[in-house]
Amino acid sequence: MTKLFNSLKLAVSVFAASAFLFSCTDVDKTLGVNFIPSDEIRSIKIDTIYPDAYTISLDSLSTVNSGLILLGTDYDDIFGSTVAGSAFQMLPVYDTVKFGNSPSLTSLVLTMPVSTMTGDEAVAQTITVYELSERLYIDSSYYPVTPVMTMVNATPVGSVTYNGNGEDIKITLDPSLGNRLLNATDEIMTRADTVTKSPFYDFFKGLYVVAQPVGGSHRMNYVNAGATQLTLTYSNSKATDTTCVYMTDMVMASGAYASVQFNTIQHDYTQANPALRINHMNDTTASAVLDSVVYLQGLYGAAPYIKLKQKMITDWIAKKGLDPKQVAVSRAELVLELEDFSGQDITKYPASLAPPTSWYPYWVGSSFFNWLPSFSGISYYDGTLNRSLKKYSFNLTYEVNRMLQSNTEWKFWLSSYAKTTSYTTTMYNISQYVAYRGVMRGAKHSKPLKLIVTYTEPK
C-alpha cells in the first residue's frame, strides 16, 4: 500500500509540473506556414446572399394512383377552405362472374376504410357519390383541378352522413346502378388479356366521391385506395345472398396499375381570415413581385418557389473584388425561418421539406424548374425543421459551386415530402398525403430568407 501511495504521489507531481511548464510556453501557431507559398495562403470567410422567393400554386401535378383517397374538408385562417374528393375505376375481383338465371338485387354498398384523419374526428360530414359519365385512362394525366364535375352524371347515386370515429365509410348506392351491374353480360364481366382494355371499364366507368362539412366543421379523411371496394349482393334461382366484389386497386402481372384513381382538390382562399389570407399567387416570371412571406400548404396548395440567379453570384463576386476561379465554397446553406404572425402551433408545421427529385427538367403549369443534384438521393433531404430555432436549412453547396463555374440558374419549389408510388415510378416529393402548412420569411421580409456562404479566398 505504501508503494502504491508513493507511485500515485509521483504521478500527480509529474502531471502538475507538466501543466505548469506547458502553461508557461508560448506555442507558435504559425509553425509550418513558411512552407506554404504566399500566393496559396487562403482565408476562410462567411457572407450572405439573398435569393428571390415567391409563392406558387401547385395545381398542375398529377394525382394519379397515389395509394390514398383524400375525402373531406380542411380549413385554415390563412389558406381558407380546401375540399378534396376522389374519382376511381373498379373491376370485378374474379376473372369471370356469372350472375345466373333471374338475378335479383339485394344491396350495393361502397366501403371505404379510413386509414387516418385530421381535424375534428367527431364531426358529421355529408359524403356524396356520383357515377362517372366519362371513362378514365391509365395513360392520361389527371390533376387536383381536373374539372371532375363535368365528368359525372348530375344525379348522385348515394350519400351518407359520416360521423367519423375511425369507422369505415359505408354508403348504400342506388338500386338502379346495382340492377345495371347485374345485367352485365358474360363478355363484359370476362376480363380481356390486357386488363386495361377490359370492356367493363366502358360498361361501368367508375365513381366520384366527395365530402362536405355539416355545420361548418372540418375533417380530412385519408382512405386506403387499395382496400376500397364495391359489394354487390344478389339472389338468383339457385342461391341467395351471393356477392360480387369490385375493387379499385387491380394490378396486372407486370406490376402496373390497371385501374385509375385520382384525387381532386379545390381551394377557396376567400374563406380565409381577411387579415391573414394570401392575396394572390405570384407568377414565376421576371416581372412577378417578390413575396414578403412565402407560404406552404400540403394537399397541393401553395409552395415556396426559390430562384438562385447567376447574377446574384457574379454581383457578389464583383462586390468582393474576387476572381471566381480563386473562390472555393465549402458550404452554402439556404435558410428559411418561420414567420410567427399566423399564431400557429409550431408542432403543426411540416417536419421536413424537399425540392422535387423525380425528373429533370420539369414544369409546373407553363414554368420551367430545375432538378437539384444535391437532393437526388432518396435519403438525402436537408430540409428538416429545427424546431428550437424555427427554421429550415438546405445544403446547396454543389449548386453554388456550379454557379461559380458556369452560367447556371437554379429554380425550384419546396414541398413537404412523402413517399408515393404511381403506376410508373416511386416519388418522394409529393405532399398530398398530408395537410401540412407553414409561413416562412420571403425575399422582401425585414429579415429575409438567405443563402449563407462559407468560402475561402486568397489572403
Image (tube, rainbow, N blue to C red):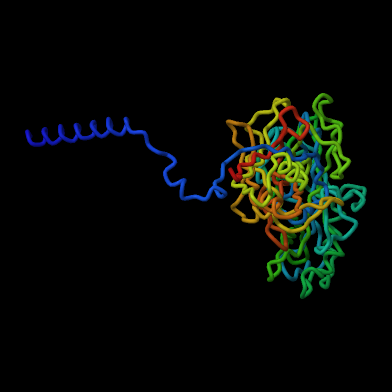
Image label count: 0
Q: Quadrant of residue 347?
A: top right
- Residue 373 drawn at (x, y percent): 67, 55
Of all residues, the one furthest to the bottom in this rendering is 193
Side of 392 relative to 198 (left or right): left
- Of 292 and 387, nearer the camera is 292
Side of 6 relative to 66 (left or right): left
- Rendered view: 452 above or below 201: above
- Residue 180 drawn at (x, y percent): 86, 60
- Of 253 and 345, nearer the camera is 345
- Residue 216 drawn at (x, y percent): 80, 29
- Rendered view: 129 above or below 178: above
- Residue 49 drawn at (x, y percent): 70, 39
Q: Quick check: can you spot residue 161?
A: yes
Q: Quadrant of residue 88?
A: bottom right
- Rendered view: 96 above or below 209: below
- Of 132 and 354, nearer the camera is 354
Q: Quick check: can you spot residue 108?
A: no
What's the residue at 75%, 71% (across, down)?
Answer: 96
The image quadrant where one finds the C terminus is top right
The image quadrant where one finds the N terminus is top left
What's the residue at 44%, 41% (across, down)?
Answer: 30
Q: Quadrant of residue 391?
A: top right
- Of 186 and 115, nearer the camera is 115
